[in-house]
Amino acid sequence: MSDTERINNRIDTYSEAFDFYIERREMPPEIAADDQLGAYMRQVIDENPHLVSVDPLWAEVLKENLMDFFQALLQHFAIVEQQLAAELAMINRFRSASIEQKRRQWSGVVGHIKQRYTKYEVNIDGYSQRFDGENNDAVFAALTSDWESACRNHAEETRREMLARSKQNWAQRFREIGDQDYIERRKIEDIVYKSPVLSEIVDIIGRARDADGTVDNLMYSYLPKGLSSNDAGEGISKISFGNDIERVTPSETLLLSTPDTEQLFYQCYALRQLQQFSAPSAAPLKTQINNPLPRPKKGPIIVAVDTSGSMYGRPEQMAKSLLIQLVRIARAEHRSCYLITFSVRIRSIDLGRGANMRALTSFLQQRFTGGNGEEKLLIEALRLLESDDYGMADVLIISDFIFNPPDRANTERVRKAQSKGTRFYGLQINSNSKAFDALLDRKWKA
């Protein structure tokens, strides 16, 4: 396994531990008690309770920035690990050598230890004086034991110093950019909350299981829930929009904290567009139309986003907002979420992994430019579907669909995937193209 793979696996572990600690206020067994980064993560969360209790988005922003910091730090730790491994290999070679080999290596070992360690760590002169020809094996055993302990302590101290030097800079940087990251992310997310179409896509691809263990074949008939009452005894059903100050979410009240966003709060209040908690009503939320088919409780998600120039502007913001929600579902439910971006060339990455959190931020910061690459999109999506990890996935294509219909070979591969339970969905923005209609199980227009 390469250093990069080891680092990514470790970031996945820390990412899951972050959520675990917020929920249970204890670290999972995978994080050792003496784990320096694990201890620092606990400290950061404990010192910022408002960040993880006021709004879940704050926790996401904090986690993304913290995991990005850990990833950079682990790259430096990897160098320390390489040096540690080389030193331990040297110790083991000396430990397993014959007495004659030890004699030949002795001067080099003495010079190395004197250069690297103090006499309080490894008293090499003291060991030299203890050789009397009778107990040399015991002396060598004690020497190599002290040498190994000093070696490991050096590596641990080096990592500790690296963390101590770096964490202050990271904390200062997070204080400077954390609020801005949150505001920008909130603006993007609000697009989903204000769009019934996008909210419906999130609900369907989220794919919560019905009581009988099945889900509807394709479509639900949604019924209005009715008006929320102010009865505090009623639970919270979901987020809705209005101007009931008693039910406004904490994230909306944060808009009042700065002059730049205060006007936005009052504007949303006047338009009854503030996010607020809505209470459940007696009316059913949905009724099934088609016959139910058995589906897995949770499956992978593949999101293909058209990043060509025709998607610039409003389509781009809608795509990013929807992607954030789907990635959140995937991470919360430990589902794989593969992002395929396509224009002239195809790029793909699993955003469900904690190690790839920064990749989502980078995608949200980029601007959509370029031409179309629809055929490559299908090839990449089908490649994933035919792998062990992504069978039975839901595929969502976000595009204006202004491109040629797929060829016969890829059409047949799509049909084969659909016959095994894969769903192909489409969100069409700002066009009336029907190029992919024959392949999609369902298409929304926005």
Image (cartoon, helix red, strand yellow):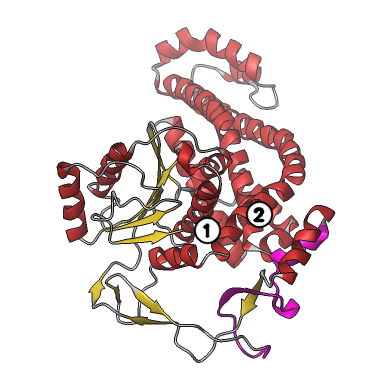
Side (left or right) of 397 relative to 20? left
Judge by depth and name the residue closer to the eye, 327 or 334: 327
In this view of the protein, can residue 433 be seen by the observer?
A: yes
- Residue 80 pos. (x, y %): 56, 27
Three-letter code for the amino acid on which mark 2 is drawn: Arg
Asked if residue 244 is positioned above or below residue 2 in the image, the reply reads: below
Label 2: how many Cα within 10 Å (few below 14, some 14–19, many 20+): some
Dot 1: element: loop
Alpha carbons under labels 2 and 1: distance apart: 12 Å
Q: Which mark is residue 42?
A: 2
Q: Mark 2 or mark 1: name the one nearer the start of the chain.
A: 1
Judge by depth and name the residue closer to the eye, 101 or 380: 380
Give the position of the N terminus as an image quadrant: top left
- Residue 313 pos. (x, y %): 56, 45
Q: Residue at x 74, y 36 (%)?
A: 169
- Residue 11 pos. (x, y %): 51, 44
Q: Quadrant of residue 215?
A: bottom left
Side (left or right) of 211 relative to 243? left
Three-letter code for the amino acid on which mark 1 is drawn: Pro
Q: Are marks 2 and 1 in contact (CB under 8 Å)?
A: no
In this view of the protein, can residue 142 be seen by the observer?
A: no
Question: Which residue is the site of mark 1?
Answer: 28
Q: Residue at x 78, y 66 (%)?
A: 266
Label 1: how many Cα within 10 Å (few below 14, some 14–19, many 20+): some
Q: Which mark is residue 126?
A: none
Q: Quadrant of residue 220?
A: bottom left
Side (left or right) of 269 relative to 195? right
Could you tell me how many numbered marks the image carries? 2
Q: Which residues are magenta?
A: 230-257
Q: Quadrant of residue 221?
A: bottom left
